[in-house]
Image: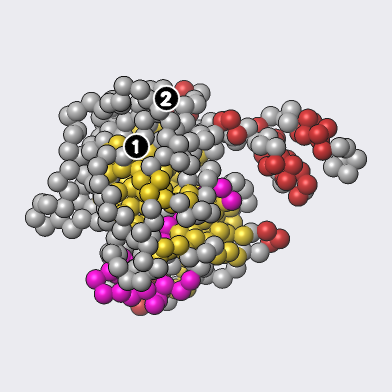
Amino acid sequence: MSDLLPEDVLVNIIGRLAPRYLAISRCVCKTWCTTIDAHNLLRMDLLPHSVSGLFINFNELSMSEFLSRPSKGPAISGKFDYLPSAGQVIDHCNGLILLHECVVNPATRQWALLPPRPSPNMPEHFCHGMYLVFDPTLSSHYEVFLIPQVSYNSNLDPAIEELEWPPSPCIVQVLSSRTKLWEERLFVREGEAAGNVADIRLDFQAVQENAVYWRGVLYVNYQSKFIMRISLSNDKYQVIKPPVDFEWFEFENESRLSKNLYLGKSEKGVYCALRYPSTVSFSIYILDESDGKTEWIMKPHYYLGSQGIDGPGPWTLQDINYNWDTQYEDSMEEKFEWDSDSDNVVENRSNGGYPCLPRIELLGFHPYKDVVFLSDTLRRGLAYHLDSSKIQDLGNLHPTYYGTEQGIQPFLLTAFPYTPWRGWFPEDT
C-alpha cells in the first residue's frame, strides 16, 4: 500500500485508526512506522508535552522535594497531604507517580491504593524493585512491575552465588489497574545472562536505580551493572551492558557508583548519562536498536564547572519537608511558562574537565528536547542543552537546613522530571 499510495493519502488513511490499532500499525513495516512518527499520528495529544518540575529524593528526608516552575493553569503541588501516607517518589511514567502504597496523578490530585504486595517467591536475601508503566496512547490503565533483585549480603550460600542472573525465565509480579490483582508473568531471556549472583549482588551503598518506558519496552537500570530490556508485548527480556566498564570508577570517598549513571528518555529515544566521579565532565549515550542491533552511540563529552549562582531563579523549591503545614500556591502575581530556550542563560564556567568539585549530579532528561537537568553542588538546578552547551539556571534546589543536622550525610538519591497529565484516571473508567 505504501508503494501505491502517495504519502499524504496514506497519512489520511492511517490517521483515522483508533489509538490502539494506530500503535499496532507502527509494527507493520518500516515505511508505516516512519510515516506515523514523522506526522505525529500516534495521538501524541494524549501525552504530556512539558516539564513542570522535578521530584528530587534526598538522603534522610522522608518526602520528595518538588522543584517546579510557574505555569498557566492550576498550581501543581508535590506535597501529597491528601494521601493516607506520603513518602518519597519511587517512579514516574507519563504523568503518574508511584509511591510505596499508591499511584498518584499530582496534576489532578487523583490516586489509587495498591493492593498488598504478594510474598516474594524467592530465596532469602532477594528483593524487588518497583517500576510504573503507563501509556495513555494505548490504554487508560497502568501497571506496576516488581523486578527481582539480589540484596547485599556477605553470607550468601555459595551455591546461590553461582546461579546465573537474571534467571530465565524471570518471574515478575505485575499489578494491573484493570484487574487490581498481582499476577505472575514469566519473561524468557534472549541472549546471555549478566553474570552470576555473586557478580550482580547489590552494593549496600547503592542509591540510584531507575527505569524508562519507551514504546512497549521497559528498560531497567540495574545499579549500573546492566540494563534489563523487558519487552511487554512478547514476554521476553535481554541484558544490555552499560556504555562503559565501571570497574575503573573507584575514586576515594565516592563509592556510590550507581549515582554516576542515569537512564532516561528524550528526543531520540533511550538515553544514558554518565557522570565521571571527582571531575566536572559527563557523557551522553543514545541507545541504537535499529536493524536488530543494540548499540550505545556516544555524543561528545560535556564539561561543567561550579557556576557559583545564588539568589532566586525561575523555578521554586516547594521545601515540602520544612513547610509541610504550609499550603503551596504560585506566589507570582503573573504566571508564566518557563522558556526552555532562553530564560536565565548563564556562562559555563568549565575548567576543561580536570578534577574539581565532584558534586555535579544528574537529575534527568527533558523528554522532548536534547536537554539534561543537573544539580550544582546540591544547591542549584541547571538545564544543560546538549547541542549548544548552553546552560540555564533553574533556581535553588537545596532544602532548608538540609545537611546541618548532626549525623545526616547530605546527598541526592534519585530525581524524576515530572510531565503533568490531566487526562482520565484509571479508577474513573
Q: Is residue 136 magenta?
A: no
Q: How far, Cα to Cα, is label 1 from label 2?
A: 14 Å
Residue 298's image quarter? bottom right
Q: Mark 2 — residue?
A: 72
**Residue name at image x 43 percent, y 67 percent:** 225
The correct choice, above or below, for 325 with respect to 147 in the image is above
Question: Considering only order in the chain, which callout, 2 or 1, is on the residue closer to the N terminus?
Answer: 2
Image: 119 above or below 206: above
Q: SS at mark 1?
A: loop
Q: Which residues are magenta?
A: 244-268
Residue 174 rendering spot, x and y as whole percentages:
47, 45
Q: Residues within 10 Å of mark 1 (few under 14, many from 20)?
A: some
x 21%, y 44%: residue: 399
- The amino acid beneath tag 1 is Pro
Return the residue at label 1: 314
Instruction: Assess disc 2: are there few (<14), some (14-19) or many (≥20) residues with their C-alpha within 10 Å of its C-alpha.
Output: few
